[in-house]
Image: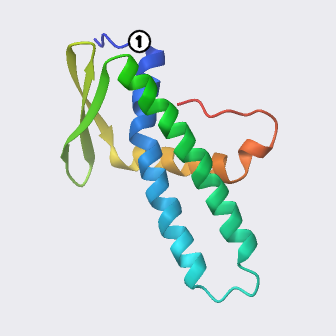
């Protein structure tokens, strides 16, 4: 049984997903820059805009976590699972995440930050 309320756990999970998303966006940006697209600037602008938005969201998330005495650390990783230690107001909890689930969630966030956020206010539920 977890002592972490859903709202705070969701914020802590953002601290897992958003840095992963930034890594993906950064790698993709480098690939786009090296590609031989005829008109690559719109793609670069799209990815850079998404990165700025994700960085701002991560800044807000980290600030909230700092103010509320919350930390997260990756403790173990293998082919199937990644374990994180959640430190929440003096409590320690270990949470195991299935690696394909991490990848799928990052993909959902990638879709959101690249184009779905411009549609109706469809904020991601993390």
- Taking depth in this image into account, of 70 and 105 the one nearest to the observer is 70
Spot occupied by residue 82 in the image (x, y as percentages of width and height):
26, 44
The residue depicted at 41 percent of the width and 45 percent of the height is 102
Left or right of 124 in this view: 69: left
Left or right of 45 in this view: 69: left
Extreme residue in the right direction = 120
Report the residue marked by disc 1: 5
Question: Circle 1 — which element?
Answer: loop
Specify the color scheme.
rainbow
- Taking depth in this image into account, of 117 and 108 the one nearest to the observer is 117
Spot occupied by residue 62 in the image (x, y as percentages of width and height):
42, 32
- Taking depth in this image into account, of 1 and 113 the one nearest to the observer is 113
Tell me the quarter of the picture where residue 43 sits. Answer: bottom right
- Taking depth in this image into account, of 92 and 70 the one nearest to the observer is 70
10 Å crowding of disc 1: few (<14), some (14-19), many (20+): few
The residue depicted at 28 percent of the width and 11 percent of the height is 1
Spot occupied by residue 122 in the image (x, y as percentages of width and height):
73, 34
Left or right of 81 in this view: 12: right
State whether residue 35 is above or below residue 93: below
The residue depicted at 77 percent of the width and 32 percent of the height is 121
């Amino acid at each position: 049984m977890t002592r972490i309320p859903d709202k705070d756990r969701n914020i802590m999970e953002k601290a897992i997903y958003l840095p992963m998303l930034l890594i993906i966006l950064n790698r993709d940006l480098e690939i786009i820059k090296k590609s031989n697209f005829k008109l690559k600037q719109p793609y670069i602008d799209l990815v850079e805009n998404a990165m700025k938005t994700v960085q701002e969201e991560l800044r807000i998330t980290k600030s909230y976590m700092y103010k509320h005495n919350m930390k997260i650390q990756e403790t173990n990783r293998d082919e199937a699972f990644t374990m994180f230690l959640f430190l929440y107001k003096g409590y320690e909890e270990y949470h195991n995440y299935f690696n394909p689930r991490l990848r799928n969630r990052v993909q959902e966030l990638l879709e959101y930050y690249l184009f779905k956020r411009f549609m109706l206010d469809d904020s991601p539920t993390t």
